Amino acid sequence: MKKTFSVLACIMALFLCVSGASAANWPAKNITVLVPLAAGGNTDGLARGLIVPALEKAFGVKALVKNVPGGALTLGAAEVANSKPDGYTLMVAPLGPVVLQTQLRTLPYGKDAFAPIYFIANSPSFLIATKDVPSSFDAMIADAKANPGKYVYGSTGPGTVPHINLIALCKQYGVEMKHVPDRSGAEVMKSMASGTTHFFADAGMYIPRYDLQGLVIFSDERHPDFPNIPSAKEIGSDQRFSVWNALYAPAGTPAEILDKIYDACKDLSKDPEAQKFVSGMGAHFIDMTRAEFTDFVNAEYDKFGGIIKEAGIKLE
Amino acid sequence: MDQAILEAFAQTTSWMCLLCIFVGTLWGIIVGALPGLGSVLAITICLPFTYALDPASAIALLLGCYCGSVYGGCISAILINTPGTPQSAATCFDGFPMAQQGKADLALGWATGSSVFGGLLSCIVLIVCGPQLAKFALNFGPVETFALILMALTCIASISKGSMPAGLLSGVLGLFLVTVGMDPVSGNMRFTFGYFKLSGGFELIAVVVGVFALTEVFARAAEFLNNKAPQVAYSGMRFAPWHEWKIRIGLLLKSSIIGSVVGILPGTGAATAAFISYAEAKRSSPRSAGMGQGEPDGLVASEAANNAVTGGALVPSLALGLPGDAVTAVMLATLVLHGITPGVRLMIDNPVAVYSAFIALIIANILMFFQGFAVAKFFARFLRIPEPLLMGMVVILCLLGTYGIRNSAFDLVVTLVFGIFGYILRVFGMPVAPLVIGMVLGTQLELSLRQGLLLSDGNFWAFFNGHPIALALFAMTAVLLCLPLIRYGLERRRAALGQAAPPEVEE
Amino acid sequence: MPKITGRLLFSVVMFSIGAFLLAYSYTTANVAAAAQFGPQFFPRILLWTWLVLALAMMAESILLKGRKYKEQNWKGLFASIGLTALACTLMPIVGFLPISLTFMLAYPWALGYRRSTVLIPLSIIFSFATWYIFNEILLIPLPEIPWLA
């Protein structure tokens, strides 16, 4: 017994040498980057391929990726929202858990539980359709109006951006379509390939990969890789949707730590390797300062808030 | 095209690539054999290493990992009645009884041989008719998937030999447990009672680890009298004589084909294949009466099928860019990171990548055979340590494995609760495996049912109209279901008429 | 009066739980989904089946012959469950290392294996090796000891 006690005492002493941190000597130990998705997706790839190397290079400590999937990304986000704002827990997440889910459900956190740091990458959403749908947007709308319930749109789940996107679209043009959700982008592609689903609103990279067509891109300008797809502005719609990933810390993290992290990441957009990495996912960088990014988050929040209220969507 | 094959061969037999296959497969087997750590975790851990490799080696590493982990699960399934991965749950049914009869080395031999056979056969299927099969898989819409999963569920009836209502109830419980959390169609929360942590639902691995691993640990503690545990003594791996293998060739082929086909169909994985194969073996094998008590047929059916899925899952992934399961999804993501775009044009734009994947898989399967031997011998030594120590380590590893999935304290509690619940089930003679089968199949079952109903505007009878594949599957389900039920009815009748077996002794 | 076996009690408990869940599924307000098959559609099918099967189990346990139970090591069983419960609940709070070290000492001890010359080194080596492999090599974060975090 005495032997055990002395051994344990030695261990404790050893660990006390690696003591806790303050903002001045941040980072003094490993940083955890939480990703509210399972490993292997785009967000996870961005975290592991871009953010982790950037942090490790800038600060010399290890950055570990922690995957916490579940609850439509809210479980991971809730964990980050509740963790200590000391700069050792960060989150790389898409827009869903921060600006969308917070308005659809009662969650133990709100949009303000996060301090936005760095806007990583953006992919504007396209209206992707199977090849048997009429290629012109107007022709498609006319056909959909004439045959309510003929067309089916898919999504990666109820309350996700592709879903909200199509709800808004259908409402604006007064068409009726069925919604058949799947659980992931891959499953939606499978449904489209087998003819079950006709539409999906997500990043453009799916179009050449799976032999599909794009009817419109939900942004102001046409995309350089897809010069034949009209923009929403051209067809007279003011809907703008995109899928974007960003780096956050829990609200209340000291501003100096946030600035340090921002400085470590801000040059990623100039790195050609990083650019190649990101464009492989069909996305691109947009430079924003922390303040600009915070405004952007609020703007997105309000935009979705408007759509949700107008369409009357509420999930429990 | 031959040019591409030659180049792929050159790339895959480069020393770096072979090393990756070797390490990946060995790593996969070890992770697969450790209860609580599954294929997805094994792949996740390999991910950072793939960034620095060239595309062929990266894919080879992941494929080796995949292959090895699906096989590795059988080692702990046979030796300690705990499937190392959910895909090997069906291997416990006959594997552990064989081990208890002192034939653990034989069981491992059956499992290894069947796994390698299944894997290699699926590679051949993949190479020969990959793209055509991929097209066929596209005919599987929600209705067909629903029919297929229903067929897999009949496995529950086949293994509920003790008590049919108990087994079925266990299965229904499993199906129910996956409805807890967010509804995949409407987004509503179900049965969470306002508790946020439940909104993510029950994690499958947490339940599997609880119900198989912890239950086994508790059961052994209960049996541990006078410092003497019922030891499973054995020494490595042994293969049954050729004539034993010969009579099961048909079963091997059939199970491998089932596995390959199920692998090709998206939405279903190795576990589903193993269950369907087991149910089919139970229906058609001349030795089915012994299944569940240590009949090699059960091992052959389960292990050949689950490894055949590895080749099958590559078919839609490479031909169409549609990943068959979580593991192939990670593989495709890795391709993207290396600048190779998966999708319908992969075969045309980058045939070398496709062929090197096939070749890597074949090499991995062959290596697996030898590595399995070595790992089995190692585990033989390892399992000789006194049982309390071993069980202590098993518990810690299982808890880590559960925690490592979602980094969730809640999952640990789930594992504990299901461990206790599984033990209670065992005491009352209720089979525990159907619970896991229900959970594995439940989400996809409900989702495809609801999707089908959405598409047909709520008309269930439309499921039978205009879906020939689904009709065929429904018919087979009926056939698979009838036999166990009839057998059960006859057994009960015999018991009631007084020609009963002696009252079963509780174990 | 049918014999009250453990099995009968168990099936009655299962039936009650099923009935409770079924009643609950009728009380929650559900968003009406398309095609009138809302979120509770599938669970209700399952729960009705559950009730029927629980009844069948009850009937079976009344008609079945009783089961004999082998001698059990109750102390061992409860020690095993108790220690595992402590490990599960305390690990996220206290951290991996203390729990692993304590558990590897206490568990074999409780089951009767008392050779401390093996226990102490084994628990130390095992805990640290596992921690090192997971945290440093595999890069899977394990629960940290909170007052050091």
Image (cartoon, coloured by chain):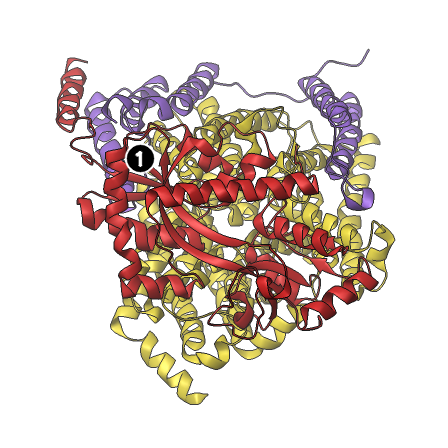
Quarter of the view holding residue C101: top left
The quadrant of the rendering that contains the N terminus of chain A is top left
Horizontally, residue B418 falls left or right of residue C12, namely: left
Q: Amino acid at mark 1?
A: Ile
Chain letter, disc 1 residue: B
Query: Is residue B101 in view?
Result: no
Residue at the spot of label 1: B385
Quarter of the view holding residue B25: bottom left
Provide the letter of the chain coloured purple.
C
Query: Dot 1 lies on which element?
Result: loop
Nearest the viewer among B394 and B54 is B54
Nearest the viewer among C39 and C63 is C39
Indicate whether B428 appears above or below B13: above
Provide the letter of the chain coloured yellow.
B
Identify which residue is drawn at 79% across, 55% down.
B479
Horizontally, residue B114 falls left or right of residue B425, namely: left
Nearest the viewer among A238 and A105 is A238
Task: Write down the colour of chain A.
Answer: red
Indicate whether A289 appears above or below A9: below
Please provide percent x and percent y for residue A20: 20, 26
Nearest the viewer among B96 and B143 is B143
Please provide percent x and percent y for residue B243: 54, 65
Q: Residue furthest top?
A: C1
Please provide percent x and percent y for residue C45: 78, 37
